[in-house]
Image (cartoon, rainbow, N blue to C red):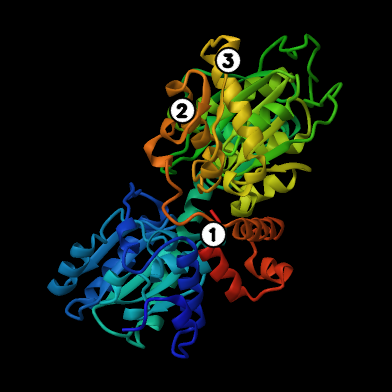
């Protein structure tokens, strides 16, 4: 058994680079070998997905060939969840049951550390993980080989095929076997895609009309006739993708919709036989339909008349509780602001959220704040990005987690925001603490309706004590602490006894000295300026990367 620390492993010549990099990512995610598997979570699996349907007969054949060999096969979807597990070996079945690795289990590397399926999804390449190369200690009785399943058309990873065994190393015959099976699955994905596309095209052609706009949607596939191309903008298409899920797909009642041009239309959904989530949309112009401002829309092309002035989006990023919403309202100045949250998209449903955004966009007034843009589902994110790209009122103010944590489409959207306001965690803003505390106490006193003579302030030593805390809840936590103290102290100086018990002593770890706090601020600033890149931050600080990691641990610096 190797030592548990990553530093020892970096000096171990037997550790392969792929595994060492994965271990590093796991430790930076805050995982430890002894407790990483405690984070095993479960989610719903789509048993009718294209991946599961395409893989089923191929895996049935593979499993028949593996009967009696002691091997276990796992089919994992693109979200890291186990979609299917098979084994004919009683020991293997008992082992995986004991681990809880069954349908729905999430094997993402960020959750449980180095493992074949999770690391494949992280690296987009095949990965072999021998027993004690697993990050989580409970997995070290198993050796695994994972191979990505890539859709031949979209080039997107659809999932991972993993073959595992209760062995110390992976059998050298496993990789070529798995690669061949994956090729068969990918071919079936391609064949299924072709069938779906042919059926979608057939339904589109049957519904198409030379003068009536018609759109067909299925996954990433979009088919439009010329009338639809002339009428619809990118924002309109993004909205149709979201609303398509709620449109009656049986030729039912038409749904009214106002396009970005201001023209009013009605949309009707038609089914596509044997194509799951496929829909053909017929779009009818409403006679006399006009813009919200009363002017007529373009009769034939949907051309934009009197386009409003360009308005650039603003990004406010930072950890939760750091004052993102307050900063967003400040960015709006005196302009009326409407807030849409990612939480409401979850509670009310994507379609309702999209309709609310659509109504605000059509009004072309004020400021729209999208809270938690990095938590939005892909379809809603595309809709927000489409409006941001249009550059018209209402102005968008987006809030998100720390900028260095943004990835993929969210990072691309953030890059379009020229005005970016990065909020540091409260622990890095100790110099601002007196001003923040004074403002919060004044606000809390005013909210409680206190008389002028009932003012309170921090007593000696209390501010120094508060400065020693890490404040994981940032401004939200600070306000809760002060609210507790103000309720206990009607007037005069707030003492240590007025604070919640959890905040009457320095944080769980020792308080940093003034020199350490200054050093911590420098590390945080370097990481922020480098966009979270540890190599660049270490270079800017004039220290080695290993030294930077050590200082991050000592000074309690984390990258969320």
Position in image of residue 419 (x %, y %)? 77, 40
Residue that badge 3 annotates: 446
Crowding at dot 2, Cα within 10 Å, few <14 / some 14-19 / many 20+, comes out as many
Pointer 3 local density, CA inside 10 Å: few below 14, some 14–19, many at least 20: few
The residue positioned 54% from the left and 33% from the top of the image is: 459
Residue 373's image quarter? top right
Foreground pick, 275 / 208:
275
Q: Say if 497 sits above or below 418 in the image.
A: above
Q: Is label 3 or label 1 in front?
A: 3
Tell me: residue 125, above or below residue 444: below
Label 3 or label 2, whichever comes before in sequence order: 3
Could you tell me if the residues under marks 1 and 2 are in contact, i.e. CB atoms within 8 Å? no
Which residue is the site of mark 2?
Answer: 485
Structural distance between the alpha carbons of marks 3 and 1: 55 Å
Q: Nearer the viewer, residue 64 or 367?
A: 367
Give the quadrant of the N terminus.
bottom left
């Amino acid at each position: 058994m190797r030592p548990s620390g990553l530093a020892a492993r970096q000096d171990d010549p037997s550790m392969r680079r792929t595994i060492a990099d994965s271990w590093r990512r796991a430790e930076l995610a805050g995982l430890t070998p002894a407790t990483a598997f405690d984070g095993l979570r479960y989610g719903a699996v789509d048993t009718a997905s294209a991946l599961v349907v395409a893989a089923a007969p191929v895996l049935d054949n593979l499993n028949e060939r593996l009967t009696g060999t002691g091997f276990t096969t796992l089919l994992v979807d693109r979200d890291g969840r186990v979609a299917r597990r098979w084994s004919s070996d009683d020991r293997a079945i008992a082992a995986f049951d004991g681990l809880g690795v069954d349908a729905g289990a999430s094997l993402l590397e960020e959750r449980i550390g180095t493992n074949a399926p999770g690391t494949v999804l992280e690296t987009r390449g095949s990965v072999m993980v021998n027993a004690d190369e697993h990050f989580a200690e409970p997995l070290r009785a198993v050796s695994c080989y994972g191979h990505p399943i890539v859709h031949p058309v979209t080039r997107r990873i659809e999932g991972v095929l993993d073959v595992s065994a209760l062995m110390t190393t992976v059998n050298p015959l496993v990789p070529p076997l798995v690669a061949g099976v994956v090729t068969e699955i990918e071919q079936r994905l391609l064949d299924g895609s072709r069938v779906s596309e042919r059926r979608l095209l057939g339904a589109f052609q049957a519904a198409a009309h030379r003068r009536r706009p018609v759109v067909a949607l299925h996954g990433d596939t979009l088919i439009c006739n010329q009338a639809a191309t002339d009428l619809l903008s990118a924002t309109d298409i993004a909205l149709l993708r979201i609303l398509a899920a709620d449109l009656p797909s049986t030729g039912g009642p038409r749904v009214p919709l106002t396009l970005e041009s201001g023209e009013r239309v009605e949309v009707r959904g038609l089914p596509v036989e044997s194509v799951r989530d496929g829909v053909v949309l017929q779009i009818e112009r409403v006679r006399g339909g006009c813009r919200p401002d009363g002017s007529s829309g373009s009769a034939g092309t949907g051309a934009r008349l009197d386009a409003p002035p360009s308005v650039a989006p603003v990004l406010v990023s930072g950890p939760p509780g750091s004052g993102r919403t307050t900063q967003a309202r400040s960015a709006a100045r005196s302009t009326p602001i409407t807030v849409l949250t990612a939480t409401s998209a979850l509670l009310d449903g994507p379609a309702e959220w999209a309709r609310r955004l659509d109504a605000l966009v059509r009004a072309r007034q004020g400021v729209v704040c999208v809270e938690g843009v990095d938590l939005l589902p892909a379809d809603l994110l595309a809709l927000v990005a489409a409006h941001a790209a249009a550059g018209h009122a209402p102005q968008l103010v987006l809030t998100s987690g720390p900028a260095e944590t943004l990835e993929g489409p969210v990072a691309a959207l953030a890059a379009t925001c020229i005005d970016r306001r990065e909020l540091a965690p409260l622990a890095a803003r100790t110099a601002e603490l007196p001003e923040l505390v004074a403002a919060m106490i004044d606000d809390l006193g005013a909210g409680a309706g206190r008389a002028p003579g009932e003012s309170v302030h921090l007593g000696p030593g209390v501010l120094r004590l508060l400065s020693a805390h890490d404040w994981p809840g940032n401004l939200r936590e600070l306000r809760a602490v002060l609210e507790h103290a103000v309720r206990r102290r009607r007037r005069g100086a707030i003492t240590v006894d007025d604070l919640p018990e959890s905040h009457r002593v320095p944080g769980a770890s020792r308080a940093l000295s003034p020199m350490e706090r200054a050093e911590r601020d420098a590390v945080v600033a370097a990481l922020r300026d480098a966009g979270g890149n540890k190599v660049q931050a270490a270079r800017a600080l004039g220290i080695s990367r290993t030294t930077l990691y050590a200082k991050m641990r000592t000074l309690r610096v984390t990258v969320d």
